[in-house]
Each structure stands twice: as structure tokens, then as C-alpha cells.
Amino acid sequence: MSDFLWINSAEQLDTLAQQWLQQDALAIDTEFMRTDTFYPKPALIQICDGKNTYLLDPLQVTELQPLADVLQAETVIKVFHACSEDLEVFQTLLGVVPQPLYDSQIAAALLGESFSLGYSALMKILLDVDVPKGETRSNWLKRPLTDSQCLYAAMDVSHLFEAYQILFARSEKLQRTEWILAEGERMMNNYFQAQQAENYYLKVKSAWKLSRRELAILQQLCEVREQRVRQINIPRSRWLKDAQLWDIAKRGPKSAKELANIQGIPASFANKNGDKLAAIVRQAAAINDTDLPAALPKPLSPHAMSASKKLRTVANSAAEANGLAIEVLLKKKDIEQLVRQQPTSVAALPEGLQGWRAEMIGEALIAELHKG
């Protein structure tokens, strides 16, 4: 299915959206550019309903509420491949993210294929087609799009729909469709949590080395940066890099002059922003101890690392017995949470291990954790 139809008007989109709302599933992909901005620049939206493939130009059709309604329709499964960036595109463009999600990369891992398969590799496995890569990094914002770009974009979703049909049949046979949809919901929830400006400090490398008061500085610095870069739409590193924020939190400069002494911070930036950042340092110094953020956990001790290896061995056995990729069954962060929290019941397992994971491996993990 390589032919495609252009959506050129809001009226046409509205008509098609009514049709799509009657479908069981839609394969969707996006093309965007993001080189010097915080937000992605949406350039093309591709949709396949199993019969036809459509290309929607968001630079030309700007009244997109009918598409937002489709993306939010609970009765229509939205099929993507490795959709984390697509979520951001739609949140930027429409203020919504698609749900329910059926991610073919996750589905493949839950149905016996390798973990984190790329789109081309999965299409080769399922459809025995070679996906051309020549247009992957082309300029999708330039108009008019070339015939090669349009064909590439159309084939992406037409192949994806065919692959979905194969995966869905397998997931229904193995009774794992709900697992895949639950993983889509988990991905969406993780995306929204990651977008919260006040949480970004948790991603900063070596943040665990900071005291609680230093963490308070880092948290506020990250939040100020998030607000600023989103406002002026530039990459985070164009304002200050994570490592520089960490240095500020650790050294606690109380003036623009002290800020300029930190390696890598230009004097011009310090002169412009020094007073504001120094004020954050002073404010953090005045926070009551009870209101400081919790200390972040240190890396696991050798003894804890040994325990985590035993948990992974348990998970390996379960994954092999159920035809799963181990990485999709038990992630590194889940193992660390188990070792740190030492839950004594399946109900007390970390959130990431609830649902189908708890049913498959919960009791075995608890038993291994508390083996005498």
C-alpha cells in the first residue's frame, strides 16, 4: 500500500475524522524537525486506516481539532512505533497525546521478538520488506515535499498497519493485547510526569551526591531553566547545561561575580542572570529542613548489587519461560527499587511492577528478596 491521499483542508479532515472514529485502529506517524528549539516543529502527519494512507500537512491545515478528537477516542487504537517523540509532537501541536496506544516496538518485545527493535528491523522481520532510509534526515519543513519524501512517509504508516495486524493477531492469541495497551498507558503517564518542570532535577547526573539543601537549589535552578527555555523555545543546553546547574548547586554562588567563576559559564550569562540565580541560592539557604527535598539514593552497595543479580536471574527464567525479552519484563530501575524498598507482598511492589508483571513474577521476586 504505497499510494496516498493528501488532506488539504479543514473540511476534508473533518469528514475523514468522522470515518476514522468508526475504525478499530489507525497507524500513525509524524515527521518533525528539532535542531535548535526546545519544542519539535511538526512537519507532517501520516495516518493509515488499513484501506487508505493519508498525509496531513499541519503547515497548511491548521484547524486540527477533529484530529485531536480522534487521538482521544477510547474506541480507536492508535498504533505507533517507538512513540515517545510522537507524543511530544502531538502535545505541542494539539495539546493532547494519543490514547489508547499500541506501540509496535513494545508489542514485539512482549511477543517474543528482541527488545527495542528499530522500525526497519521490525518491518523486515514481520513483512520481509526493506525500508529505505534515505529520507530519514531530510528537511521535512521545506515545501514542496519531494515525491521521495511523500512515498517514504506514506510507506511508514502503511507498513506499520500491516505489521500491527500481525502483532495484534499474535497478542490476541497469547492474550497479551491488554499488556501492550497497559504499557502504552504507562508510557503516556511517564511522559506527563517527565514534562513537570519541578521534576527535572531528578534526571541530573550525580544529583545523588548533593545534600538535601543543595538539591533544593538544583531543583529550583532546573525549574527556572525549564520555564525559560520553554518560553523562548531553545534547547536546555543553550541556556545552561545540567553539569553547570549541578556546579551552581554545589558551590552556591551568592553573586554574579561568583557565578562567573564557575567553569563553562560565560561572563555575559553571569552578568545577565547572576542576580536571579544567586537569589535562588539564598532562598534555598532559608528553607526549613522539613521542607527540603528528600535525599536521593546512592548507588547500590556491592551486597545490594549481588541481590539485584539474583532478582535478574529470577526474571530471566520467567522471561524465557514466557517468550519475553527480559528488558521489558524487569527494568534496571525496577530492580533497584525492589532492593531498596524490600517489599514483603505483591501488593507492595513498585508501581512499575504492578499489573501483568506482578501476576507473572511478583511472588517469585518477593520470595527471592526474602530468601533466608
Image (spheres, rainbow, N blue to C red):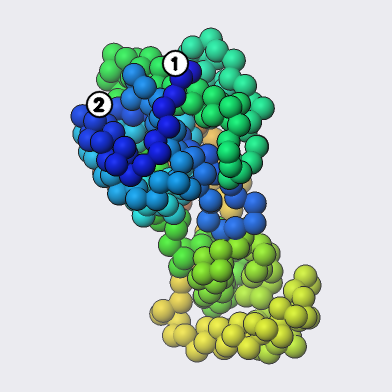
Q: Splitting the image into 4 quarters, where does residue 37 fall? A: bottom right
- Circle 1 crowding by C-alpha within 10 Å: few under 14, some 14–19, many from 20: some
**In-front residue for pair 268/210:** 268
Q: Position of residue 250 (x, y in %)?
A: 66, 75
Q: What secondary structure is found at the residue carrying circle 2?
A: loop
Disc 1 marks a residue whose amino acid type is Met
- Locate residue 105 relative to residue 13 in the image: left or right: right
Q: Position of residue 29 (x, y in %)?
A: 45, 34
Q: How many marks?
A: 2
- Locate residue 199 relative to residue 145 in the image: left or right: left
Query: Marks 2 and 1, Cα distance to the nearest angstrom?
Result: 19 Å
Would residue 361 be seen by someone viewing this image from the given angle? no
Task: Tell me the mark number nearer the camera, choosing from 2 and 1.
Answer: 1
Q: Do callouts 2 and 1 mark residues in contact (Cβ within 8 Å)?
A: no
- Circle 2 crowding by C-alpha within 10 Å: few under 14, some 14–19, many from 20: few
**In-front residue for pair 248/127:** 127
Tell me the residue at 59%/53% (across/down): 299
Tell me the residue at 75%/80% (across/down): 268
Residue bearing mark 1 = 1
**In-front residue for pair 286/94:** 94
Would residue 169 be seen by someone viewing this image from the given angle? yes
Q: Position of residue 130 (x, y in %)?
A: 59, 15
Q: Position of residue 372 (x, y in %)?
A: 41, 37
Disc 2 marks a residue whose amino acid type is Asp
Q: Residue furthest top?
A: 128
Instruction: Say which mark, if any, is on residue 258.
Output: none
Instruction: Say which mark, if any, is on residue 24.
Output: 2
